[in-house]
Image (cartoon, rainbow, N blue to C red):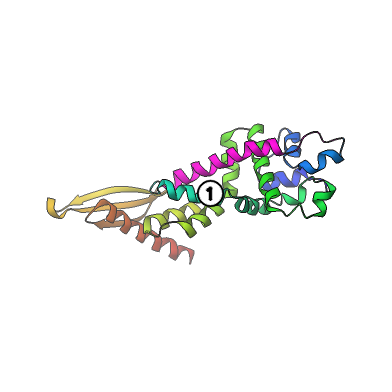
Amino acid sequence: MSHDPAQIQERLGYTFRDADLLRTALTHSSCLNESEELTADNQRLEYLGDAVVDLLVAEVLYQAFPQAQEGELTRWRARLVSTEGLAQLAQQLDLGRHLVLGRGEEATGGRTKPANLAATLEAVVAAMYLDSDWDTVRRVMLAHFRPYIALVTVVAGPADARSRLQEQVQAVVGVTPRYVEVGESGPDHRRRFAVEVVVGDEVWGRGVGPSKRAAAQGAAEQALARLSAAQG
C-alpha cells in the first residue's frame, strides 16, 4: 500500500518541502530487500525522532507544571513516550495505513503493531524536524500531544486545586495559569494574604488565606468552579 502524502500532511498540519523525508519516515525496514526503488528505511529517523519527542514532551511538562517534582515529571514523560502512548497517537494520525511494508510484515499485521506505529511516529517527527526547525515541530506536534498530556497528567497527577486547575486549563485553553499576590493585611502574628489566579489576561479566581500558598489554593478552587460551570 503506498502512502498518500497529501492526506498525511493534512492530518499533521504540516507540508513537507522535501517529500523524500516523509517517504523515508514511512518506510519499514522489511521492504528494502523487496524493492529496487527504496534505498533507505526509517530506522535512522526513528533514532533522531526518539530524542526530539523526548525533548518536546519534557519541555511541555516542565513549563506546564512548575510545582511538579522531578519524579512526577519523569513518570508522566515515560507514559507519554512509551511504545503504547506513541502508538495511540500514531493511530489518531492514521500513520499505519500509509506505512510501506514488506510482504511478510504486511501479512503479520504490521500496520497495527504498536512498535511499528511508535517508530513511525518518531520517524515522522524527525523528518519534520530536519525539514523545518524546532519551533515548527513544537507548534505542530503540541496540537496532537496536548490531549494525551492532559489525560496522563490528570490520571497520574496530584489532586490539589492548583494542580487540577493547571491540568484543565492546559487541556482546554493551552496556557498556564499565573498567580499574583494582590494584598496583605493583619498583624504579624496573623497575616492574611490575597492572591488572584490569572488565565491569559483575565482573573479567574481570588483567594484569601494565612499564607500565600493557601490563598493560591483558594483562588484555584474558585477558578475550578468557574471552569466547571462554563463547561456545563
Residue 100 x, y percent position in the rendering: 79, 45
In the visual, does 192 lie left or right of 64? left
What kind of residue is marked 1? Ala
Q: Residue at x 65, y 42 (%)?
A: 122
Q: Residue at x 62, y 54 (%)?
A: 84
Magenta residues? 37-65
Q: Residue at x 60, y 49 (%)?
A: 144
The crowd level at tag 1 (other Cα within 10 Å; few <14, some 14-19, many 20+) is some
Depth check: 213 or 38 in front? 38
Residue 187 visible to the viewer: no
In the visual, does 196 lie left or right of 17? left
Q: Secondary structure at mark 1?
A: helix
Residue 211 x, y percent position in the rendering: 23, 53
Tag 1 residue: 78
In the visual, does 39 lie left or right of 173? right
Judge whether residue 40 is colored magenta: yes
Residue 19 x, y percent position in the rendering: 75, 35
Q: Residue at x 80, y 50 (%)?
A: 105
Judge whether residue 164 is colored magenta: no
